[in-house]
Image (cartoon, grey):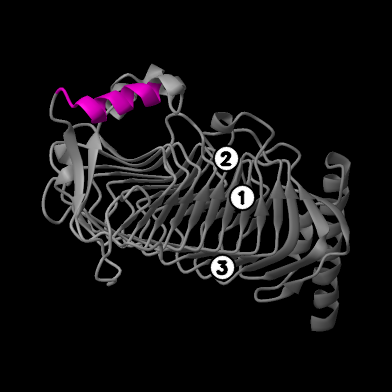
Amino acid sequence: MRTYRKLIVNTGRLWIMLSFLLAMTSVYAWPPLQLYIELTPANGVLRPEPGHYSGPVTITRPITIEGQGKVIVDAEGVGSVLTVAADNTVITGLELVNSGNSFDDMDAGITLKADKVRIEDNVIHDTLFGINIVGANDNIIRHNRISSKDRKPALRGDGLRMWNSHDNLITDNRFIKVRDLFLTNSEANRLENNYISHSRIGFELIFSHENELLKNTIEYNSTGIMVVYSNELLIRKNTIQHLRSFAGSAMAFKESNNIQILDNKILHCAIGMSANAPLDPENIITMKNNQFLYNDIALYFYGERGGHILEKNQFIANILDVQASIPEASFYNRWQGNYWDRYEGFDRNHDGIGDTPYESFLWADRLWADVPMTRFFRGTPMLETIDFMERFTSFSEPAVMLRDPKPVFHRP
């Protein structure tokens, strides 16, 4: 009798699955991947046959999906392609395409709402958002290629969006033609070796403390790294280059405490770094061993009084090394042991340090700094003549922008 009942139950389940499959195939253009996920037991491994599958898909128990680079999941313009709501899930080797278009719902290639998930070696394109991480911790996002829909940057979704998510590792991903990589209220994450190109803002951090941004490459964006109300950050060994937007900066900081900026290369940008003067002694930026090369303005400070620490940096072939809303915002920073290609002193004792301090004055630069429209004439014979006349005749005392008492004589 028990065997007979078991046979009836199994037969009923089979008919349910077949009915579900027939119903789904009559609605979707391709087999629904959701069906295969429902048939996969907890902690099981799903390796779909190579091909095209329909979404959206939701994972509610821990499984491993291995697409091996041969499985396409298409949401057909509805919602997020894949939603992960189970801890310890693994998603690898999938191509996720064609999400919905809702900014309110944040339609994405992957929406992650679980902990200790690994998302690796996936391709996400033609989706509004790339990966949307919501209240999820201790996850690994690695070796993924992500792009948004073919729109103007402001109308795309974020390639990576994190809210209230901590201790995640985001590494070795490529984000091309997305909007931003946006972190809010997210702490202690590590973002390393990522490539971001042809987007709006590389990394935007708001109320996100103790994050590490390491060895990332950002190029051809409007802005590189924007930090607002975020403390205790480490920004190290990043390369930010070719950011030519008039109002953009390679790095921009507002009221963020104890930021360490070390060993970065800032190349060919409109503004290398902009920061407000610290509001208190704790609200400082420490910059060491950075390179600023071929920028319009290497550093721009705004506010009433400086206080940041700038040591052992290199300033090479910038149109203007330092600019400030008022000179005091820059002068009262601590400048020590930097290399300035404009230094005109000597090193008679051959100790590698200039015999006299390096001082930077505002001459004709004040003109195009105060009247942005005159930037068009930078480097022209007319402006160079005005600059020479101001230096030669000195009708009035120029503003002193900075004083480095121990400039490095030879380029490191």
User: Around disc 1, counting alpha carbons within 10 Å, would you say few (fewer than 14), some (14 to 19), or many (20 or more)?
Assistant: many
**Foreground residue, 343 or 22?**
343
Taking the spot 16% from the left edge, 50% from the top edge, the residue there is 307
Q: Amino acid at mark 3?
A: Val
Taking the spot 13% from the left edge, 36% from the top edge, the residue there is 304
Residue 352 location (% of width, % of height): 30, 69
Residue 262 location (% of width, % of height): 36, 63
- Label 1 SS: strand
Residue 394 part of the magenta-drawn span: yes
User: Around disc 2, counting alpha carbons within 10 Å, would you say few (fewer than 14), some (14 to 19), or many (20 or more)?
Assistant: many
Q: Is residue 383 left or right of residue 14?
A: left
- Label 2 SS: loop
Q: Which residue is tagged 2?
A: 199
- Mark toward the start of the polypeptide (3 vs 1): 3
**Foreground residue, 222 or 52?**
222
Q: Amino acid at mark 1?
A: Phe
Q: CA distance from mark 3 to mark 2?
A: 27 Å
- Mark toward the start of the polypeptide (1 vs 2): 1
Dots 1, 2 in contact, CB < 8 A: yes
Magenta-highlighted residues = 383-395
Q: Amino acid at mark 2?
A: Ser
Dots 3, 1 in contact, CB < 8 A: no
Q: Is residue 177 left or right of residue 36?
A: left
- Label 3 SS: loop
**Image quadrant in which you'd find residue 374:** top left
User: Around disc 3, counting alpha carbons within 10 Å, would you say few (fewer than 14), some (14 to 19), or many (20 or more)?
Assistant: many
Q: Which residue is tagged 3?
A: 117
Residue 153 location (% of width, % of height): 58, 33
**Image quadrant in which you'd find residue 372:** top left
Q: Which residue is tagged 1?
A: 175
Q: Main secondary structure of the magenta part?
A: helix
Tag nearer the camera, 3 or 2: 2
